[in-house]
Image (cartoon, rainbow, N blue to C red):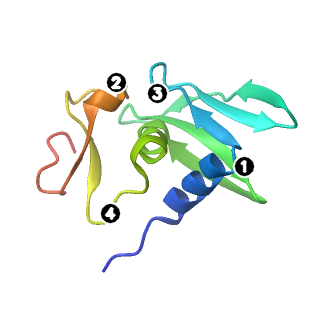
Amino acid sequence: MPKLASCDCVIKEAIDAGVISVDKNSGKVFRHIAGKIKELRLSTEKKGYKRYTLAYKGKVHKVSIHRTIWIQEHGIPSPLLQINHIDGNPMNNSTTNLELVTPSESKYE
């Protein structure tokens, strides 16, 4: 059985601890520190996926928005599955546009 991506566990832990949250409609990521909420800056990787940097428990992680939204809404996905953008647009991170698929079912890899 493949291991869970360690970053997925960090994302889940940070969400559960109230350290980060994602607005599933806008795709904006927020960090919650000492009663203040700060929107995190997003970057776009070569394939068009939106990412942000999560500093948590002394480590820095590059994290995809679509993974964070999926984990926030559904929990950590099986390591045997991928999160697919149904319409093929990596900028469209609406929960209705994300689905779990096997690598062979992924339409837009």
The image shows residue 73 at horizontal and vertical percentages of 43, 41
- Look at the image and tell me in which quarter the N terminus lies: bottom left
Callout in the foreground (3, 2): 3
Amino acid type of the residue that numbered disc 4 sits on in the rendered structure = Ser
Tell me which numbered mark, 4 or 1, is placed earlier along the sequence: 1
Amino acid type of the residue that numbered disc 2 sits on in the rendered structure = Asn
Query: SS of the residue at dot 1?
Result: strand
Which residue has dot 3 on it? 24
Query: SS of the residue at dot 2?
Result: loop
Amino acid type of the residue that numbered disc 1 sits on in the rendered structure = Ala
Q: Residue at x 75, y 26 (%)?
A: 38
> Is 34 left or right of 55, judged from the image as shown?
right
> Is 38 left or right of 13, judged from the image as shown?
right
Disc 2 crowd, CA 10 A, few/some/many (<14, 14-19, 20+) = some
Query: SS of the residue at dot 4?
Result: loop
Which residue has dot 1 on it? 55
Disc 4 crowd, CA 10 A, few/some/many (<14, 14-19, 20+) = some
Tell me which numbered mark, 3 or 2, is placed earlier along the sequence: 3
Vertical relation: 92 (above or below) 54: above
Tell me which numbered mark, 1 or 2, is placed earlier along the sequence: 1
* Label 4 – label 1 distance at C-alpha: 24 Å
Tell me which numbered mark, 3 or 4, is placed earlier along the sequence: 3
Determine whether label 1 and label 2 are within 8 Å by CB.
no
Q: Residue at x 55, y 30 (%)?
A: 43
The image shows residue 87 at horizontal and vertical percentages of 20, 27
* Disc assigned to residue 92: 2
Amino acid type of the residue that numbered disc 3 sits on in the rendered structure = Lys
The image shows residue 96 at horizontal and vertical percentages of 28, 28
Toward the viewer: 102 or 44? 102
* Label 1 – label 3 distance at C-alpha: 21 Å
